[in-house]
Image: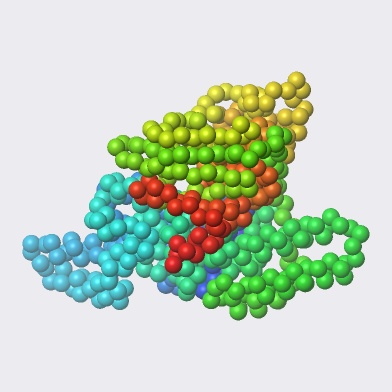
Amino acid sequence: MLQVNNVSLKFDKRTLFSDVNLKFTNGNCYGIIGANGAGKSTFLKLLTGEIDTTTGDITVSKGERISILKQDHYQYDDMKVLDVVIMGNDRLYKIMKEKEELYSHTEFTEEDGYRLADLEAEFLDMDGWNAENDAAILLTNLGVIDEYFESLMKDIPVKLRVKVMLASALFGNPDILLLDEPTNSLDLDAISWLEEFLINYPNTVIVVSHDRHFLNKVCTHIVDIDYGKMKMYIGNYDFWYQSSELALKQMKDANKKKEEKIKELQDFIARFSANASKSRQATSRKKMLEKIELDEIVPSSRKYPYIDFKITKNIGKEILKVDNLVKEVDGKKILNKISFTIQRGDKIAIVSNNDLAKTTLFDILAGVSKCDEGEIVFGKTIDPGYLPQDNSNYFDNDKTIIEWLSQFYKVDDDTHLRSFLGRMLFSGEDVFKKVSVLSGGEKARCMLSKLMLEEPNFLILDEPTNHLDLESITSLNKGLENFEGELILTSRDHELNQTVCNRIIEILDDGSIIDRRLSFDEYYEKKSK
C-alpha cells in the first residue's frame, strides 16, 4: 500500500498542490489527470522520492518495491537490452553483477564463499534463475524480436528502446508500478498487450496518460489535479469527464430545484454503474460507484479550446483519387502501387507499423513532396488543409502569435483574430508571446487555429493529437466528429479513430495496402484475433 499524508509541494512562490491525502491499494489502477503544468509527472517523482515534499510525507508498506517508467533511454546506450530490462529490479540486478564479480576471482577466499552463499539464497528467493527468460517474454510481448536481446541499446531503433524501458519498468512484478505516458510511440499491438497486462495486474498501478481509451480501459480510479488540490474518483476517465460536465451544467442552471439535480445525477451514476463491464474489477467497480456521495462530484476548472472546422466551399462528387502511387526511400519501396478513391462522407484512418510510410503518404497528398510513380487527382471543388506532424519550420521566426497568424489570414482589424485566439486559450497578453518560445501544446493550438481559419473542405492530419493535453484532444475530437467535409488522418489516439473514422486503410510492411470500410474498433478486434 502507498499512502500520501498531508502532502504539499511548492516551487518558489507557486503552490503546485496542497493538503493531498490519498491511499493507493493493490488490485487498482489509478489514472492521474490534470491540465498541462498541473504537476502530474512531478507527483510521480514525489512518490519515488526523486524530489521531496514541502510538507507531509509519503509512506510505502514495508518490503514493497516501487518501479517507474524511465524516460531517458540514452543513459543506457552501452548496456545490453536484456540487462536493461532486468535492471528494472535493481536489487536482483546488483545480486547478479556481484555474483559475476565473485565467480571471476582467480583466488577464491572463504569470505567470498560465505558471501556467495548469501547471494545465491537471495537470488533463489527472487526467482533469479528465470530472470532472463521473464525479461525475454516481456520484450517479445511488446514486439521486440530476440535478435535484439544481446544488442547494445544504442544499436537498436529508437522506437524499440522505448519498449525496452517499458519492459524494464514491468519486470519482476513490482508492488507499485508508476507509468508516465506508457503508450507514447507504442504500436497498436503493444498497446493492446499492455492494456490486458494492466487490467489483470494484481498490484498497484499509477499512470499518467493522454490516451483516453487507455485510461478508460485500465483505470479503476481517476485522481484529478485541479484547483491546486488532488481528489480521487471511483471509475474511469469517461465517468469522471461526464460527471464533471454534468455537475458544471447543474451549477450553471440555478433555476432547477435541488431535488431534480440530485435525481439527474443519481440516474447518471446508476446508468454508468450498469455499463461498467469490461474488466475483472467490474463487480467491485459497480459497488463502489453506487456508494458515491453526490457532493463528491464537482465541476472541473479546466478550459477547453473551441475547435470547429467550418466549410464555405461546396464539395462536388469527386474528392480524391490515388492511382498506383510509388515512393522509394533509401532503396526500399515504402509505398508500393497504392490505389484508392475517397468518396463523399469518407473519414479515413491510415494505420501502419511504419511511421515513415504514413508521413510520406501525407506529405505527398499535401504536395510537400513528390511520388516516384503514380498520380494524385483532387476534385476541382476540393481545398485541402494539411496539419503536419513536424511543425518546427513554421515557428522558426521572431513573430508574435497574432503576427504569425496574420500571415495566413489577412484582416484590417486584429479584433477578429484576438477573439479567435481567445477561444483557442490565447487570451490577453498571450497573443504577443513569441512563437519561437511556445510549448509543443501551444504550437499545436496555433497550427489548429491556422487550419480552421483556412476553412478547408478536406483535411489531411498527421498525428493531430501530438503535444495536446486531454482538454484540447477532447475538443479536437468533437470538432472532427462535426466536420462536414472528408478527411484522412493517422493517429495513435484510439478514441479519435473510433469516433471520427468510418474507413481504415492499413499500409503493410511491403508498402501495399488493405482497405476496409469498417470502424476502428471493428478493425482493432479483427487485428487482435
Based on the displayed image, in which of its 4 quarters is residue 281 positioned?
bottom right
Name the residue rendered at 42%, 72% in the picture. Answer: 63
Residue 142 % position (x, y)? 38, 60
Q: As drawn, is 190 to the left or to the right of 441?
A: left
Q: Is residue 147 above or below residue 11?
A: below
Quadrant in the picture for residue 119: bottom left
Choose between 162 and 504: the one closer to the eye: 504
Front residue of 318/478: it is 318
Q: How many labels were placed on the picture?
A: 0
Q: Position of residue 392 (x, y in %)?
A: 50, 32
Q: Is residue 56 left or right of residue 255?
A: left
The C terminus sits in image quarter: bottom left
Vertical arrangement, residue 111 with respect to residue 249, above or below: below
Q: Please provide percent x and percent y for residue 97.
A: 23, 61
- Residue beneath the point at 55% across and 73% down: 279
Say whether residue 353 is left or right of residue 20.
Answer: left
Residue 499 visible, this angle = yes
Q: Nearer the viewer, residue 301 or 101?
A: 301
Residue appearing at x 57%, y 72% in the figure: 278
x and y, in percent, of residue 217 in the image: 55, 65
Is any part of residue 288 visible from this angle? no
